Image (tube, rainbow, N blue to C red):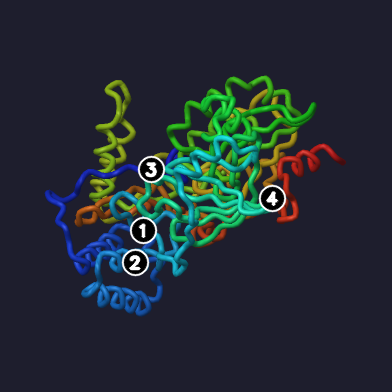
Amino acid sequence: MKKLIGLIAVLLSQTVYAQQPNCNCETIVTRLIHKVETEYPGFSAKTPDQDNYKEHVKNISDKAKTADERACQQLLKKYTDYFKDPHMLVMANGAAIVTESQAKGEQIAIDIKEFEQKVTKTKDLLEGVWTTAGYKIGIKKTDANHYIGFIIEAESAAWKPKDIKFKIFANGDFEYALRDRSVKKGKFISPDENILYLNEVNVALIKQLPKPALSTVELEEKLNNTVGFHFKKLSAKTSILKLPSFEYHNLKKINQLIEGNKDLLENSENLIIDLRGNPGGTTDAYQKLLPYISGKTIRHTGAEFLATQTYINNLEAYKKTLDKDVSTEGTDKTIKKLKENLGQFVRMGEATGPIYIEEVTIAKKSPKNIIILVNKLTGSSAEYLLFVAKQSKKVKLMGAPSYGALDYGNAFAVDFGCENYKVFMPTYRALRLPDYPIDNIGIQPDVYIDSSVKDWVQFAVDYLEND
């Protein structure tokens, strides 16, 4: 059970229908509504005012009769937005549908080939051609204090060459255009002249032109040592463990990081665990940390799952992805229980009540004081670690309220009967509801860090080491 709490299992289900038709908008909307009303575990709790909900549905259904594809996608998003669930969204052609912004965005007048030739000789540390996930970006200096980052190439059809993606300023600020063209502001850092990291949007760029002296691998390693997974000593008393993600593919890396730094972990008087920007993943990711940060017991809140045929199909599909030597006993028991209780809420494993107690074998040597850094981008299973860690007398959370995505979880992307469309939707609801909601609220820090603090890590070190 503990492995499921807060876990976002982004598994694409097998097709539920024998054939996925290319539906018109009215059909797409009707099928999405039916899917949510019958399979979303938060439906009854989120629709206490049925008259208001029915009016919302009628408004969307009426507009769907004449909507083109673009307008239809906005109607789908408007429908799911009603539930205010961070774990619910509609996907079209494999990508989440975002709200169309009224902002048209900006373009830069530039000859890209000419720019690429000129920047090979630039002496400016920020000007050049940079790459990040999905983008090749040019950064051009416009005056003494301003730079423009523009698209050279983009995997997303939402961005075209010469579109302005971000602006950066000499004082360390940036303005970054999200996919819907809304602007996110924040601070950037440059741990190396060939590395640029936009903190609040978690975007890391590596320079390609002028060609850096270090290799791409060396630059990625240097970036990783600054904002990626790392464990290092900051002072004689204090060490820091940076965990930017709990996604399942990072599990081996995290376990090796903790095991490989066991001496440092055991002999540091103070430990800072940096979870800023961690969107969650699997709760397996932090199990090796618990003996060092928690007390003898952890009080977990349980959850109950809505037994649906879709969820059963997803688990059956998941079994087929496992290696032959991996046991499916637990999954088989879950499937059996779901089949026996179709349409009902069921509780799995040891979590038969609203709470259950986990016994923890505490490490013989561990840090005396622990600070966990958290911000608005800390979500899902990373938030559940906050929930667990707050129960320890030696742990304090520091920073800003977390994202707030923990009431409904274990989400899957599932078909609802129309080609190229899926809905990403939770399968369980937490049993602490309605007494202790976290969605759209977040977990509050013990020590709030305001915007005047530029270096959160140093702030934490000073807090720990200065009486």
In this rendering, position of residue 57 left or right of residue 191: left
Picture quarter with the N terminus: top left
How far apart are labels 2 and 1 at the CA level? 7 Å
In this rendering, position of residue 15 left or right of residue 190: left
Residue in front for this viewpoint, 185 or 242? 185
As helix, strand or loop, the secondary structure at mark 1 comes to loop
The first of marks 3 and 1 along the sequence is 3
How far apart are labels 3 and 1 at the CA level? 19 Å
The first of marks 3 and 2 along the sequence is 3
Q: Residue beneath label 4, please?
A: 170
Inspect the image, locate mark 3, and give the three-letter code of the amino acid beneath it: Ala
Callout 3 crowding tier (Cα within 10 Å): few <14, some 14–19, many ≥20: some
As helix, strand or loop, the secondary structure at mark 3 comes to loop
Please state which of the two labelled residues, at mark 1 or mark 4, is closer to the viewer.
4
Q: Residue at x 58, y 40 (%)?
A: 298
In this rendering, position of residue 286 left or right of residue 390: left
Q: Residue beneath label 1, please?
A: 97
Q: Do residues under tags 2 and 1 come within 8 Å of each other at their CB atoms?
A: yes
Q: Residue at x 78, y 29 (%)?
A: 235
Inspect the image, locate mark 4, and give the three-letter code of the amino acid beneath it: Ala
Residue in front for this viewpoint, 426 or 399? 399
Q: Residue beneath label 3, please?
A: 9
As helix, strand or loop, the secondary structure at mark 2 comes to helix
How far apart are labels 3 and 2 at the CA level? 25 Å
Residue 74: assigned label: 2
The first of marks 2 and 4 along the sequence is 2
How far apart are labels 1 and 4 at the CA level? 34 Å
Please state which of the two labelled residues, at mark 2 or mark 4, is closer to the viewer.
4
How far apart are labels 2 and 4 at the CA level? 38 Å
Q: Position of residue 312 (x, y in %)?
A: 25, 45
